[in-house]
């Protein structure tokens, strides 16, 4: 290359750089209010000490721990890999572990693609029988956000004609051992309010991101309200990732990890506001900046001179979908919330409260399920009826060209309750196909509904036969409905309902509810706000109907979430919990086997029918007093009261309570909440629960309770019935005699 | 029992509370296993109570068992109905399912209500004994015997008049009248000369009949208000304190008045004593299905079971004939009512509203005729149904004063009862709609059906057998309902549209059937049967094609097959069998003797008798007079004799000799004797009826139904085929042969 060419190249490069800078400088100035030209900024040098290695298993990404199998000649598996915009990705590696069918021959391959781009092809060699591959993933193929990783297995067992669905064509992936290994370093985000979703990034790899909410002094009630709103805003931005909330006093030492929110007056936050050139005339300011000393973390500031303004500012922050400007700060001019009565209930509550529920309310969205061996969809619905039944009306459409054997199976709690034939080989639609779910398939409480399509192509393949999978598809519309019919309603609050909806009572318009923090201990406040974060994520919207209170609510108080240590609970609530050294409460007690020696002449099927075989468990009310140290347990209780139900979270000490709430709101524990009372140790993975059937009459009302009682004691019920009939048989002749004497006197 | 009002009230309150608790308990939702257990155990108790009831004679225990059966059956029925109403209505499966599902439910609801009414009516049937008349006959009231007639053959009235004029009662106090509405001036002067001639001829015959036997003859100017008008007109010419109304074919026994007049003397507020209508010929079902004399008569259920129950509640009503009425009450209510075409029940309502009582005496004391043909049968039933509905619509029992609550309820039931026609139609249509159109009529699972429906169905079978098994074979009710469903529904619809439109139509009796023929009313049954068979075939295909629904398909297939049997049975009914005109015979056991020529008197036993002759049984070694021999028949118990001719002999395999004789009456006394022998004894009628009360098991009845339906229905279809062959193939060929 001669020097002219080199000069040309250099000039071109310079021009390019100049052009780029000419575009970037004004933007930088506008956005950051900084006059430092970018070319004067030091390039980021990555300190090796800041590089972190993260391992994400398929099990974590799938939220399932089973094996995943790829069957047939063409099967695929999709995984979503979140990559946070706050991380600089340096390397990524995909490690696959599993087992191969030992009949797979050379043309078999596993194609790995990232966001539709093929990044690798692995030979599947049956002789190896174990899948043990580490392959690099080009970092450039991964983008911030959710990345679709697809594993497509193309499997063969023979050189000539094959049966595409031959059972020996499989590859099994171990979800626990297969993983991504990612090295990355933290990156600072643009310090702009429209990037708050990156500040609180739901694509984080952290299992429990931390949020530190700081105030200069011990927070007043008004400030607590604002803190609650801030926590709600953060929780919504994290969407489903459970967060840990810490409330602290600002003491010029910033928390070591997590994002930070600082609330206070303008005077208290003046130094940071001045750095952002916020005029002093602005009274309520929301701002974001880098955390001093750590450019990769952020500090969100809420400054207002009175608590009412602070609360409004925080409520604006809680509106996570509100488009905030691409500025470092904004001041609030006006904010009006609609009246509580005008707000509809959250979808989850409506879904639990209404008799007719569209699938949309259960979180399902219209989608088309395609392909052979498609997994189907599942969702949970609330059934608060004893011996109720459910009528499902399905709106679906299916593709032409499928085999008449195709069907959409409807399962409830793993029981097949209906099968919708997709057997018209022209395109078909059902607008209102009814599937009845009998009471025997339903549980009182949460039930799992699954829509599992079985799509079979017309050309079903076979050796040397075509196997065209092209047009296997069925769409289930989200306006399909579930209708609950009959049965006796559950009258008492249930923790499982609370866990899924954030409410203990089902009202179609939100009713005012108090979050009562029994004291202002830092741990109690942290526990309460962590709970607020969780419940906000459950309800998927800010908790407009929740107001905070400090101290124990009085007996006339309405519905409330009560958080605090046990000794501060009202006496009536305390009596329902366990004491630290003994407990007396109704427990399910397994009855001693009755023995069926008296009925050996009956066949086992009949003995079973008449429940003469020992039942697995009988819900018998028993009072148990044990001498044991239960001071390490944390309790959740659904406490039914006439003035309004309480949901109580309590423990011996605030620190234990905070730890317990941390555990509870993490993955895996929250869904175990059930019944009237639950308790757990913060280090345990199991939550122990007392179900509502223990007190059937108060739980399901008189009719439901009597029905349950009769079901649990059928022979007693029969005896009572015959006794009543005997009373009639004894009484009626007397009345008939009186009538006869009056009407037909002897001549 | 000294029962204070407080005691009564307390007992009533406890009873209502217990009943309410039981009904509430039936609505509790329990697990399926518990529900199944309860159903099974209650069914067991019910069955045991039913079996024990056959061996118990003590009245208190009998009543207790009856109440136990009613209590359990009511619980199971209510439990079933509540479950049907709240859990199974198929409103989410499209228009067809919703409409027919609701129709089926309403039919079941109807069944439940009528069952309750039945339980209530039959809770304590009253069995009465006749009250003795005073020794002084001067205290006995005058009795007018009315025998209204319109267009019946005078031969039908013949034995009625004879028997009426020889009822055992002081001659001077017994006045028999023929009320001839066929001989009115209007009829005798009809514009059609032939009709006028026939009317005058008939009039002359009836006048001669009346004169011959000492009865009166009454007629009137115009035919206004049918039978009610006819009888009201007669009231102007008679004075008896009591009136016995007899249809022209209802031959009374000699003890009729002695068994009934006594009630009137003891109770001045008594308006009516009704007695059973007893029939000596077969109705079209009995005749064409060959069940006459084997099965109980169809009306026995009403007269032998229901009327005694109604009597307890003071709700017996006038049935148009075989009843005694107090003249003064008739005068008070203005004669027989004429707003509806069942003037009898209507008149009773009028009398009850004035505070008068009615009574039922359960002893058959008339021998009557039923319509022979299906069309006559339908005419009769349509009139009854229309009349009862008219009463409810035009004279609402809930608005009439002075009726007790029970009377209002039961009168409502009399109209409500006729809803069976629509209910049966719904039952016939439901399997077709389900099997052929795949409509979902009942949204349930097989297990729930087993738990709720099966115990109720079995309980219904048991209670039906308990209350009515003596007087009705299982499945007979369904057959009779099927026979009436279509045309009675049509008749009821006509009443609802125009309540005052229906007119009184005389039931044809004594029809002559010279040859077998297919009733002209058969066509709807062809349609139903065809649809039914097609749906059964479809059901088989669906069974193969829809494994998921097999349980329900099998259940409905069984139902459809049962309906097919009923419909085939109906074809058997509609195939009117040839019946040459003959006098109806009545079984009669009496010792007689026979004498002819120089032979010694031969003892014999009478088997049956009619107005024309008798059948006797001779011992094995008896001498047999040749056919054609004139013999003198002696009645030792009566001390009289008459002459008869031998018509036929028959020897059964056991060696007994049966001989048929035809009377040769020489005098009025002979005719009176003949009538008294055949129809004069109520004890004989009672024995005859009880002979038919043998009952049949459910299985036995099902076997009979299958056999009869297949053969009789098949004969109908074969007849059609043969007729068509003859019409289309044979006759043209014969014609072409010249």
Image: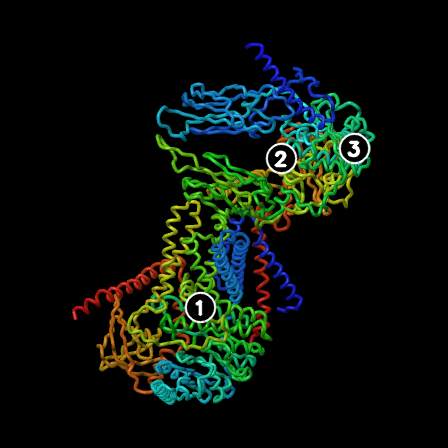
Q: Mark 1 packing: few (<14 Cα in 10 Å), some, or many (20+)?
A: some
Q: Is residue A173 left or right of residue B623?
A: right
Colour option used:
rainbow
Same chain under badges 1 and 2? The reply is: no
Residue to which mark 1 is pinned: B490
Mark 3 and mark 2: Cα distance apart in space: 39 Å
B94 vs B87, nearest the viewer: B94
Placement of A60 over or under A510, stated as above or below: above
Q: Which mark is residue A303?
A: 3
Residue to which mark 2 is pinned: A672
**Residue A166 in the image: x percent, y percent?**
40, 29
Placement of B704 over or under A458, stated as above or below: below
**Residue B336 in the image: x percent, y percent?**
50, 81
Same chain under badges 3 and 2? The reply is: yes
A499 vs B446, nearest the viewer: A499
Q: Which mark is residue B355?
A: none
Q: Which residue is pictured at 39% across the width and 24% down the height? A: A157
B512 vs A346, nearest the viewer: A346
Q: Mark 2 packing: few (<14 Cα in 10 Å), some, or many (20+)?
A: some
């Amino acid at each position: 290359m001669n020097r002219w060419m080199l000069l040309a190249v250099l000039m071109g490069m310079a021009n390019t750089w100049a052009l780029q800078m000419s575009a970037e400088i004004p933007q930088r100035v506008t956005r950051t209010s900084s006059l430092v030209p970018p070319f004067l900024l030091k390039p980021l040098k990555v300190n090796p000490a800041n590089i972190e290695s993260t391992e994400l298993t398929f099990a974590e990404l799938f939220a399932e721990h089973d094996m995943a199998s790829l069957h047939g000649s063409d099967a695929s598996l999709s995984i979503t890999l979140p990559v946070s915009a706050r991380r600089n990705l340096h390397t990524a590696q995909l490690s696959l572990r599993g087992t191969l069918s030992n009949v797979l021959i050379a043309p078999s391959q596993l194609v790995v693609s990232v966001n539709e781009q093929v990044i690798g092809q692995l030979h599947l060699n049956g002789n190896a029988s174990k899948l043990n591959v580490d392959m690099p993933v080009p970092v450039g193929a991964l983008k911030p956000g959710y990345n679709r990783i697809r594993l497509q297995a193309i499997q063969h067992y023979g050189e000539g004609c094959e049966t595409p669905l031959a059972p020996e064509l499989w590859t099994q992936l171990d979800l626990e051992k297969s993983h991504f290994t990612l090295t990355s370093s933290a990156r600072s985000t643009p310090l702009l309010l429209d990037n708050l979703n990156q500040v609180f990034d739901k694509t984080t790899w952290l299992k429990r991101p931390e949020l530190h909410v700081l105030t200069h002094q011990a927070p007043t009630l008004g400030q607590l309200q604002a803190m609650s709103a801030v926590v709600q805003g953060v929780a919504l931005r994290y969407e489903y990732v459970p967060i840990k909330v810490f409330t602290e006093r600002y003491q010029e030492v910033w928390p070591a990890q997590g994002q930070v929110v600082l609330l206070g007056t303008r005077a208290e936050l003046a130094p940071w506001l001045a750095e952002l050139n916020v005029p002093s005339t602005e009274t309520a300011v929301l701002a974001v900046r880098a955390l001093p000393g750590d450019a990769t973390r952020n500090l969100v500031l809420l400054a207002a001179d009175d608590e009412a303004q602070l609360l409004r500012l925080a409520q604006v922050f809680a509106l996570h979908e509100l488009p905030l400007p691409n500025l470092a700060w904004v001041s609030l001019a006006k904010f009006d919330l609609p009246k509580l009565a005008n707000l509809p209930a959250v979808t989850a509550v409506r879904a639990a409260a209404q008799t007719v529920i569209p699938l949309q309310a259960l979180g399902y969205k219209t989608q088309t399920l395609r392909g052979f061996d498609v997994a189907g969809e599942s969702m949970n619905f609330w059934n608060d009826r004893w011996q109720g039944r459910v009528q499902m009306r399905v709106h679906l459409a299916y593709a032409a060209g499928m085999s008449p054997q195709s069907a959409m199976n409807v399962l409830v709690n793993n029981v097949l309750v209906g099968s919708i034939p997709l057997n018209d080989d022209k395109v078909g639609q059902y607008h209102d196909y009814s599937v009845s779910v009998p009471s025997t398939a339903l549980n009182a409480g949460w039930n799992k509904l699954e829509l599992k399509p079985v799509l079979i192509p017309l050309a079903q393949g076979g050796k040397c036969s075509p196997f065209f999978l092209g047009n296997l598809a069925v769409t289930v519309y989200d306006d399909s409905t579930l209708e609950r019919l009959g049965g006796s309603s559950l009258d008492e609050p249930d923790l499982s309902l609370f866990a899924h909806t954030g409410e203990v009572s089902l009202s179609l318009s939100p009713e005012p509810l108090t979050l009562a923090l029994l004291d202002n201990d830092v741990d109690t406040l942290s526990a309460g706000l962590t709970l607020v974060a969780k419940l906000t994520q459950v309800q998927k919207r800010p908790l407009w109907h929740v107001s905070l209170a400090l101290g124990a609510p009085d007996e006339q108080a309405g519905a409330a979430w009560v958080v605090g240590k046990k000794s501060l609970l009202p006496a009536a609530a305390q009596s329902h919990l366990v004491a630290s050294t003994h407990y007396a409460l109704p427990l399910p007690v397994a009855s001693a086997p009755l023995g069926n020696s008296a009925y050996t002449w009956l066949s086992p099927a009949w003995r079973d029918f008449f429940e003469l075989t020992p039942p697995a468990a009988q819900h018998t009310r028993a009072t148990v007093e044990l001498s044991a140290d239960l001071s390490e347990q944390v309790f959740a209780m659904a406490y039914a009261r006439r003035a309004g139900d309480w949901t109580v979270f309590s423990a011996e000490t605030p620190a234990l309570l905070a730890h317990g709430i941390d555990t509870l709101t993490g993955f895996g524990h929250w869904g175990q909440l059930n019944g009237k009372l639950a308790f757990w140790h913060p280090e345990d993975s199991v939550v122990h629960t007392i179900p509502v059937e223990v007190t059937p009459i108060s739980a399901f009302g008189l009719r439901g309770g009597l029905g349950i009682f009769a079901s649990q004691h059928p022979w007693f019920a029969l005896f009572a019935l015959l006794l009543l009939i005997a009373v009639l048989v004894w009484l009626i002749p007397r009345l008939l005699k009186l009538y006869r004497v009056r009407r037909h006197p002897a001549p | 029992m000294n029962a204070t009002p407080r005691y009564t009230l307390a007992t009533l309150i406890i009873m209502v509370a217990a009943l309410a608790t039981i009904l509430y308990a039936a609505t509790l939702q329990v697990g399926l296993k518990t529900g199944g257990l309860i159903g099974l155990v209650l069914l067991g108790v019910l069955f045991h109570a039913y079996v024990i009831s056959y061996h118990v004679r003590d009245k208190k225990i009998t009543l207790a068992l009856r109440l136990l059966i009613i209590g359990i059956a009511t619980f199971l029925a209510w439990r079933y109905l509540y479950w049907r109403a709240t859990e199974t209505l198929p409103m989410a499966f499209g228009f067809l399912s919703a409409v027919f599902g609701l129709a089926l439910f309403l039919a079941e609801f109807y069944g439940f209500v009528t069952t309750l009414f039945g339980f209530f009516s039959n809770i304590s049937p009253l069995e009465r004994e006749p009250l003795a008349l005073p020794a002084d006959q001067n205290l006995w009231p005058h009795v007018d015997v009315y025998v209204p007639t319109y267009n019946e053959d005078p031969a039908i009235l013949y034995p009625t008049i004879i028997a009426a004029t020889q009822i055992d009662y002081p001659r001077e106090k017994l006045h028999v009248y023929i009320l001839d509405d066929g001989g009115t001036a209007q009829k005798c002067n009809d514009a059609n000369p032939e009709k006028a001639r026939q009317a005058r001829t008939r009039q002359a015959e009836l006048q001669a009949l009346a004169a011959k036997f000492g009865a009166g003859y009454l007629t009137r100017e115009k035919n206004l208000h049918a039978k009610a008008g006819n009888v009201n007109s007669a009231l102007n010419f008679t004075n008896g304190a009591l009136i016995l109304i007899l249809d022209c074919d209802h031959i009374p026994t000699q003890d009729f008045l002695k068994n009934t007049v006594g009630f009137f003397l003891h109770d001045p507020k008594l308006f009516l004593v009704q007695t059973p209508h007893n029939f000596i010929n077969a109705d079209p079902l009995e005749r064409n299905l060959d069940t006459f004399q084997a099965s109980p008569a169809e009306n026995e259920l009403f007269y032998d079971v229901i009327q005694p129950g109604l009597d307890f509640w003071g709700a017996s009503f006038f049935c148009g004939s075989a009843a005694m009425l107090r003249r003064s009450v008739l005068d008070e209510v203005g004669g027989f009512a004429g707003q509806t075409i069942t003037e009898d029940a209507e008149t009773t309502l009028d009398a009850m509203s004035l505070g008068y009582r009615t009574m039922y005496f359960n002893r058959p004391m008339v021998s009557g005729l039923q319509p022979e043909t299906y069309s006559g049968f339908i005419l009769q039933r349509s009139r009854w149904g229309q009349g009862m509905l008219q009463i409810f619509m035009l004279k609402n029992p809930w608005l009439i004063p002075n009726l007790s609550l029970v009377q209002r309820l039961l009168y409502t039931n009399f109209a409500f009862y006729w809803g069976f026609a629509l209910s049966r139609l719904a039952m016939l249509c439901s399997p077709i709609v389900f099997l052929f159109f795949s409509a979902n009529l009942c949204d349930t699972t097989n297990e729930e059906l087993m738990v709720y429906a099966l115990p109720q169905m079995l309980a219904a079978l048991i209670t039906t057998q308990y209350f009515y098994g003596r007087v009705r074979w299982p499945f007979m009710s369904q057959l009779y309902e099927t026979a009436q469903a279509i045309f009675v529904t049509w008749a009821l619809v006509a009443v609802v549209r125009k309540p005052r439109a229906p007119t009184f139509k005389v039931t044809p009796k004594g029809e002559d059937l010279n040859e077998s023929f297919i009733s002209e009313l058969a066509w709807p049954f062809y349609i139903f049967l065809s649809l039914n068979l097609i749906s059964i075939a479809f059901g088989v295909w669906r069974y193969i094609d829809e494994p998921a629904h097999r349980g329900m398909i099998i259940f409905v297939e069984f139902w459809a097959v049962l309906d097919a049997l009923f419909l085939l049975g109906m074809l058997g009914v509609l195939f009117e069998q040839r019946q040459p005109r003959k006098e109806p015979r009545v079984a009669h056991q009496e010792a007689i003797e026979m004498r002819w020529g120089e032979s010694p008197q031969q003892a014999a036993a009478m088997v049956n008798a009619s107005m024309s002759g008798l059948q006797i049984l001779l011992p094995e070694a008896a001498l047999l007079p040749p056919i054609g021999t004139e013999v003198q028949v002696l009645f030792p118990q009566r001390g009289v004799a008459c002459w008869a001719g031998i018509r036929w002999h028959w020897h059964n395999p056991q060696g007994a000799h049966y001989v048929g004789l035809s009377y040769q009456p020489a005098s009025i006394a002979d005719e009176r004797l003949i009538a008294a022998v055949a129809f004069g004894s109520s004890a004989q009628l009672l024995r005859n009826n009880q002979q038919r009360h043998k009952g049949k098991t459910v299985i036995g009845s099902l076997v009979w139904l299958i056999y009869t339906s297949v053969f009789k229905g098949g004969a109908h279809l074969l007849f059609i085929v043969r007729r068509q062959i003859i019409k289309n193939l044979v006759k043209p060929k014969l014609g072409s042969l010249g």
